[in-house]
Amino acid sequence: MMVISSDVIKFFQAFIRQMAKVGGKNLPKTISTSLGADLGKLYLKRDIHDWIIAMTGLQEGGGGKLEITQTPTSWILKTQHPSDFCPVGGKMDPEHFEIITESLCRPYIRGFLKAFEKRVTKIPPITKCIVRDGGCFCEVEYEFEK
């Protein structure tokens, strides 16, 4: 029997949901933060010290195309995926939006960014999300301490 990549992703998503059921939101949130920080440290070890280059690599590695916009107080990260499928959360499923974004996405990226000595001070609610809204866009805003 051949395992296809969508089966692996479905397993991963079910695993995360079960972890949240058993341990609450904080268990996957803690693990996600730690994994994000570990990946950031790997980039640093490979002499990638610019968080924008690292973040671009991270998103492109997941199949997305990243656009980063700086505002006077924050950075807006917009990722366009090749289809209406999020590599972390899957297809549109608003019922699972909160667990995916609050336990995985936001803590993972926060941990990742902190590895680059940027102090993330605020992560406003996610503007666009494939899991909540459908489509192929993910949009998140981060504010850094000056």
Image: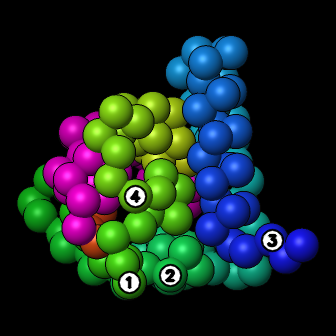
Q: Amino acid at mark 3?
A: Val
| In the displayed structure image, the side of residue 134 where residue 86 appears, left or right | right
Dot 2 or dot 4: first in sequence order is 2
Q: Nearer the viewer, residue 95 or 71?
A: 95
Q: Amino acid at mark 1?
A: Pro
Dot 1 or dot 4: first in sequence order is 1
Residue that label 4 marks: 91
Element under label 4?
loop
Element under label 1?
loop
Query: Is residue 43 shown above or below 93?
Result: below
Residue 113 in the image: x percent, y percent? 50, 55
Dot 4 or dot 3: first in sequence order is 3
State if disc 4 and disc 1 touch (CB < 8 Å). Answer: no
Dot 2 or dot 1: first in sequence order is 2
Q: Which mark is residue 28?
A: none
Dot 3 or dot 1: first in sequence order is 3
Specify whether residue 114 is painted magenta. yes
Binning the other alpha carbons within 10 Å of mark 2 as few (below 14), some (14 to 19) or many (20 upward) gives some
State if disc 1 and disc 2 touch (CB < 8 Å). Answer: yes
Question: What's the CA distance linking mark 4 and mark 3?
Answer: 19 Å
State if disc 4 and disc 2 touch (CB < 8 Å). Answer: no
Q: Which mark is residue 3?
A: 3
Q: Amino acid at mark 2?
A: Gly
Give the label, 2 or 1, closer to the camera: 1
Residue 5 in the image: x percent, y percent? 69, 73
Binning the other alpha carbons within 10 Å of mark 1 as few (below 14), some (14 to 19) or many (20 upward) gives few
| In the displayed structure image, the side of residue 31 where residue 3 appears, left or right | right
Which residue corresponds to the image point at 38% horizontal and 84% vertical from the top-left?
82
State if disc 3 and disc 4 touch (CB < 8 Å). Answer: no
Element under label 2?
loop
Extent of the magenta region: 112-135
Q: Which mark is residue 63?
A: 2
